[in-house]
Amino acid sequence: MRFLVRLSGLLLLAGCHVGPALSQFGPAGGHFSLRTSSATVQGELLAATDSSLIVFEGQRVTEVRYISLTSASIRPDGPRLHPRVVPSRADLARLRSLSRFPQGLSPELLQRFREENQITAELRRL
């Protein structure tokens, strides 16, 4: 009986180390293509705030204010964003659900994300 209990305990401990690591997962946010009068931003949505979208473009993080948007394409199944208009509460909730950080992106979390992805460029704001 003791043998079975010990064997069960060892199997449970071994099970804690089985499975993929977090680093093996790809992007979690929806893919966005955003345009402003001065730039085009394409990448993964990290977060949606009350005033802007924060997008990961590979080696750069860009914050795009809603009021500077001239067009937007959001996949998969994102809400339609109107040029230079802040989204409704329902659309903002949908945007957040499509982002990697639906709970929001604090400065500390953004810094950690930048370090983990070896991003040296400053946050670009449009």
Image: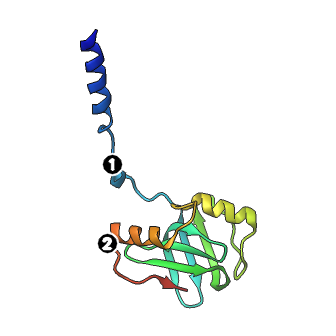
Q: Quadrant of the C terminus?
A: bottom right
Can you identify the residue that label 1 sits on? 21
Q: Left or right? Give the position of 44 relative to 17.
A: right
Can you identify the residue that label 2 sits on? 118
Residue lying at 33% horizontally and 48% vertically, measured from the top left: 21
Farthest bottom residue in view: 38
Residue lying at 27% horizontally and 32% vertically, measured from the top left: 14
Q: Left or right? Give the position of 122 relative to 80.
A: left
Residue 111, labelled with which disc?
Answer: none
Q: Position of residue 80 (x, y in %)?
A: 69, 68
- Is residue 124 placed above or below 79 in the rendered structure? below
Q: Quadrant of residue 1?
A: top left
Farthest left residue in view: 3
Inspect this view and state whether residue 117 appears. no
Farthest front residue in view: 2
| Tag 2: amino acid | Gln
Residue lying at 30% horizontally and 21% vertically, measured from the top left: 8
How many marks do you count on the picture? 2
Inspect this view and state whether residue 58 appears. yes
- Quick one: label 1 or label 2, which is nearer the N terminus? 1
The Cα–Cα distance between marks 1 and 2, rounded to whole angstroms, is 18 Å
Q: Position of residue 46 (x, y in %)?
A: 51, 67
Q: Position of residue 35 (x, y in %)?
A: 58, 81
Q: Left or right? Give the position of 95 relative to 56.
A: right
Mark 1: secondary structure: loop
In the rendered structure, are the residues bearing label 1 and label 2 in contact, judged by CB atoms less than 8 Å apart? Answer: no
| Tag 1: amino acid | Ala
